[in-house]
Amino acid sequence: MAEETNRLSCALCETRKEKRFCPAVHGRICPQCCGEQREVTLDCPSDCAYLRQAREHEKPRPMEELDREALFPEVEVDQAFLYQREHLLMGLSFALARSARAHRSVIDHDLIAALTSFGRTLETLVKSGLHYETPATNPAHQAVISELQKMLAEFREVEQKHVGYSTLRDSEILKAIVFLLRLAYGRTSGRLRSRAFVDFLAAQFPEKPSGVVAPQDSESRIIVP
């Protein structure tokens, strides 16, 4: 009897009865452990039905609960900028999605850390004219920043080709990075191993050769939190 009870118990707590299969542990667990350990101690795959169900019912994280300084409060991003630089936002968002695909271990925290680091570098450049790069000690974070820089170079090349010169300013890049950072904070669950923002980007920007497009080559796909 004891052996039968143990066989039917949760693979995590080993006390409550198992009721659902968990692909993260390749075993069956109880609903309570699923809810408490989801994206905290468990590396939940994006296609987990219980993870998807939970995300459908989760409310967005209130910005008031976040550290105000983390959101670059001095940087104003208005609706006019979002529409004027829609293609810049699309390209940078694609770069984030591309970096996450290239490095499968990347989670929301990595993208947020990379955007923050890059944003601080741009903020210094815009305010003082000095190019002082805020170092990213984590290789994954640096890889994300490199993808963003690569996309910016591609964007300038496209502008040069279709307009004859590049109009992109550092202050506009800063606004775009801050917008994406705020979007990331709004989309992530905040859990230690959350990939909600990563999965959002993957759904919005499926894999293709480049995220940079000329204005006449695409329909409006403005990203909103």
Image (tube, rainbow, N blue to C red):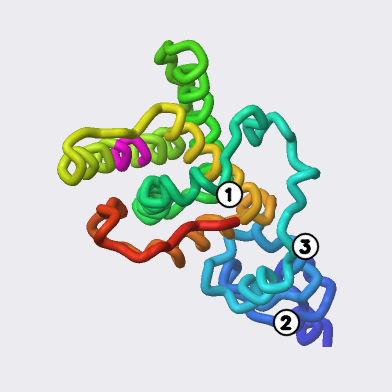
Pick whichever of labels 3 and 1 is earlier in the sequence. Answer: 3
Residue 179 place in picture, x, y as percent: 55, 43
Question: Which residue is identified by label 2?
Answer: 7
Q: CA distance from mark 3 to mark 1?
A: 22 Å
Q: Earlier in the sequence, mark 2 or mark 3?
A: 2
Distance between the Cα atoms at labels 1 and 2? 41 Å
Amino acid beneath label 2: Arg
Bounds of the magenta segment: 148-152
SS category of the residue bearing label 1: helix
Establish if 46 lies above or below 87. Answer: below
Q: Earlier in the sequence, mark 1 or mark 2?
A: 2
In the rendering, at what x and y percent does residue 141 appear?
46, 36
Q: Position of residue 137 (x, y in %)?
A: 47, 26
Picture layout, residue 171 above or below residue 202: above
In terms of depth relative to the viewer, which is nearer, 45 or 178? 178
Q: Which mark is residue 36?
A: 3
Label 2 to label 3: alpha-carbon separation: 22 Å
* In magenta stretch: residue 75: no
At 69% from the left edge and 51% from the top edge, which residue is drawn?
190
**Closer to the eye: label 1 or 2:** 1
Q: Is residue 151 magenta?
A: yes
Q: Residue at x 49, y 36 (%)?
A: 114
Q: Pointer 1: what residue? A: 184
